[in-house]
Amino acid sequence: MSWLFPRLLAGLVTMVLGGLLGYAFGLPIHAPVIVGLMGGIVAVGALATRDTLRGVRLIDWLHGPQSSDAPRDAGFWGEIGYRVERSLRACERERVRERARLQQFLEAIEASPNGVLMLDPQDRIDWCNSVAASHFGLDPQRDRLQRITNLVRSPAFVAYLQAGNFQEPVQFSDPRGMGMLSVLVREYGEGMRLVLSKDITERERADAMRRDFVANVSHEIRTPLTVVAGFVETMASLPLTETERKRVLVLMEQQTSRMQTLVSDLLTLAQLEGSPRPASDRWMPVSKLLRQVETDARTLSRGRHSITLSTETGTEIAGAEVEVLSAMGNLVGNAVRYTPDGGTIDIGWRRLGDGCGEFSVRDTGLGIEPEHIPRLTERFYRVDGSRSRDTGGTGLGLSIVKHVVQRHGGELTIESEPGKGSRFRAVFPAARVRYVEPGSDLDSTAAPRPVDQGGAEAR
Ligand code: ADP
């Protein structure tokens, strides 16, 4: 009411002044009253005009963007302007805060490794993060408000969405045909749906590999086990001559040793997979390793092949001795097993220009068809199953070699020509190869060093 009192007072004062003026000029008694009233009307009119102008100014400001301050007038229009401006500014601040919160929320969903997609009650796309867009092959802007089932046509997904039973996720191959998706739907709000998607390609692949692996191992073990069981039964039920008994025992021994080799290769693989990378400061002389490998090759070959060795003294390699020996031994063993009698096997080591070290085994054996080469390092992959088994192979050798070489930061390459022979090369990185002057402080052959006990050791 603070604005009303001054106006009433001003009207009253003007009226009294008008009356006094009329009286002073000796006018009849009704004349001062009339003049007083006129004065009052003029004063009230002047105040009303001033207030109208102020009100118009305020309305103009309200019609505008309100970026400037409200008119700072005295009186009630000024008061209204100030209060309106204050509440507008408060709303604006709240809106900015809300927008920042929404942005943060969207960024958090965007950072999720899973796809998040929101559907309206008509199953039209309301919003999706970029992971969901990539999972379903969508364009978040272009496909907004499109029905999801028009864009993702996988029958399993469409049926899942239509059935409305979202207890369990549904799995189907992603629309780009590049992998598998697991999708879970959650309902919220009024008929809205949240679609959560996850790429399970790797998991599925690992599961399939595990299943294959178990099936392969079972098969590999069952075969010799069946043979041994048959022989045991034969020995138990049939009267055998001494010669027959000896023959059966030899065959049984062959089968059990096949199982032993298989189990030992499986353990090696498990160890390689479960242990940390070999230390890069355990140095071993390459020439010693190669001599050992050459001896083993000659033993296995029993003079049926011509075996040569070319190495260089002073070179050392860092890593796990047992692992490196096993990889080199596998490559040389394969060369012996897959090279017909009279063939040649060259075992070699050389340092490459960039400081890397290359171990190579070249043979003049059977060779391998090009289509098999990329798959040779898969577990249990064999080009010729019967030949591999006849020569004591498990199908795990090259898989072990690849693992060992990779654990040492190297790379395995295979070149082969059917009927002419093969060359297997394991290239070790420069960081794991060094040249040591014979007799120098670094020479690992000069002083006794702790012997590496294998890759499974934590160092
Ligand atoms: P295996 O125990 O069967 O030898 P590997 O993993 O060592 O298993 O080798 C996989 C397959 O690669 C072998 O079955 C064989 O067919 C082929 N292979 C490996 N080394 C040679 C080689 N030097 N010459 C020809 N074929 C080879």
Image (spheres, rainbow, N blue to C red):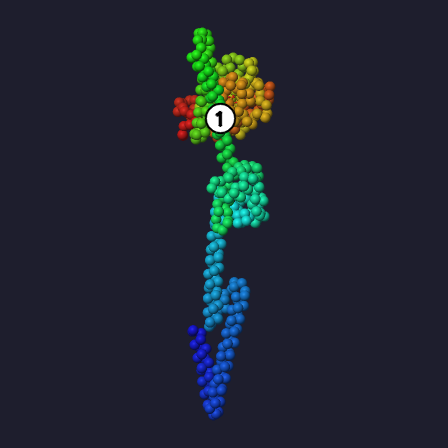
**Disc 1 packing (10 Å; few <14; some 14–19; many ≥20):** few
In front here: 155 or 285?
Answer: 155
Q: Residue at x 46, y 83 (%)?
A: 14
- Give above or below for 406 relative to 172: above
Task: Name the residue rendered at 55%, 25% in the picture.
Answer: 414
In the rendered image, residue 447, in percent from the top left (x then y), is placed at: 40, 23
Tell me the quadrant of the picture where the C terminus can be found. top left
Which residue shows up at 54% across the image and 65% down it? 63
Whole-percent x and y of residue 162? 53, 44
Asked whether residue 156 is in view, the answer is: yes
| Residue that protrudes farthest toward the front in the picture | 163
Instruction: Identify which residue, 225 or 71, lies in the foreground.
Output: 225
Q: Is residue 327 above or below residue 27?
A: above
Could you say which quadrant of the image residue 441 lies in?
A: top left
| Residue behind mark 1 | 215
19 in relation to 204, above or below: below
Image quarter where the N terminus lies is bottom left
- Pick the front one: 343 or 436: 343
Residue 382, percent across and down?
Answer: 54, 23
Look at the numbered disc 1 and give the secondary structure of its residue. helix
For image coordinates 42% across by 25% down, the residue present is 454
Q: Is residue 177 above or below residue 228?
A: below
Q: Name the residue nearer the viewer: 360 or 195.
A: 195
Does residue 311 show up? no
x then y, percent, for residue 131: 52, 43
Instruction: Name the residue type under label 1.
Output: Ala
